Amino acid sequence: MTDTLTVTVLGTGIMGAAMARNLLKAGHTVRAWNRTRAKADPLAADGAHVAGTPAEAVESADVVLTMLYDGPATLETMRAAAPALPRGAVWAQCTTSGIEDVAALAAFARDHGLRFYDAPVLGTRKPAEDGQLTVLADGRDTVTPVFDAVGARTVWTGEDGAEASATRLKLVANSWVLAATAAAGETLALARALDVDPDAFFGLITGGPLDMGYLHAKARLILEGQLSPAQFAVKTAAKDAALIVRAGERNGARLDVAAASARRLERAAAQGHGDEDMAAAYFASFGDGPASTT
């Protein structure tokens, strides 16, 4: 496989659009599709061919990169693309999905002569835009030029995408991200309830073992009301939290914090914060009350 490729990006939301632009910057030919075409159309100005259907998008592709909502949505889209999928093409599946979903996706790849990579990415809007994602990949480095364009590093986790070792690692990593985000929101909620200045808390932990850059980053989004555009949306985080809980249950681990985080995120989405940054789970502490942080 040459270093310059024709890459089809199926799913051009927050992450997929940024990945497509970085692929274009790296000199690759990019064909893009999104269920809501308006989200894909701006990529034409950057040099991408925007397709009307998944089948049109995958024509002549060396690599198909999927960045969709979840495993079932990915399988549905690939079935729609099936009539035009080139046999022997690489499929880099970057969606965060359930472990059991990976098996179904890998089976589809085998049935259609695709080389399947389980390759979820770790990162949010800004790292995606900057090409600084971490790619967690199952398999060998056949698609190194693609992963190098969208990520700062690739962590190789195994040789067979069907084993879902990259997805397993991604779910573990996301469990930490969600727990930290939930803790940050609840800490600020308690500070508000007890009439404690959040800066007094930050001053208390600064420089010590309890301090964490991620805490400050998420807290500032809440305190400064900068929850849109989302780095990682509440509704997507809720989906990932449910995947984590299910993975734990099916493998003998009860994950109480992840389950509680899922409920908080679902509650925040129901309050109208679904498209805001996942830090907006903060508002779930106040029921249907005012959305002010002051």
Image: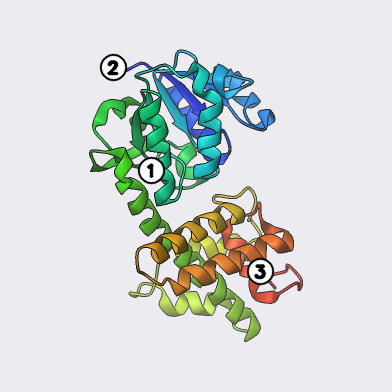
Residue at numbered disc 1: 103
Q: Nearer the viewer, residue 17 or 167?
A: 167
Q: At 44% across and 30% down in the image, what residue appears?
A: 65
Q: Report the mark closest to the observer, 3 or 1.
A: 1
Under mark 2, the amino acid is Met
**CA separation, marks 1 and 2?**
26 Å
Residue 1's mark? 2
- Measured as percent of width and height from the top left, residue 74 is found at 51, 37
Regarding residue 52, the answer to whether it shows in the image is: yes
Closer to the chain start, of discs 1 and 2, is: 2
Categorize mark 3 by other alpha carbons within 10 Å: few (<14), some (14-19), many (20+). Answer: many
Crowdedness of circle 2 by 10 Å Cα count: few (<14), some, many (20+)?
few
Q: Nearer the viewer, mark 3 or mark 2?
A: 2
Query: Percent from the top left, x then y, of residue 237?
Result: 54, 56
Question: Residue 283 bears which disc, if any?
Answer: 3
Residue 42 placed where, x, y %?
63, 26
Expressed as whole percent of the image width and height from the top left, the position of residue 112 reads 40, 24
Q: Which element is circle 2 on?
A: loop
- Seen from the viewer's position, the closer of residues 63 and 277 is 63
Out of 208 and 171, give the one closest to the viewer: 171
- Report, in whole angstroms, how far the alpha carbon at label 3 lies from the one at label 2: 49 Å
Residue occupying the point 39% across, 27% down: 111
Q: Is residue 176 visible?
A: no
Q: CA distance from mark 3 to mark 1?
A: 37 Å
> Which structural element holds mark 1?
helix
Amino acid carrying label 3: it is Phe
The residue lying furthest to the front in this view is 111
- Locate residue 135 relative to residue 59 in the image: left or right: left
Task: Classify the position of the C terminus by image quarter.
Answer: bottom right
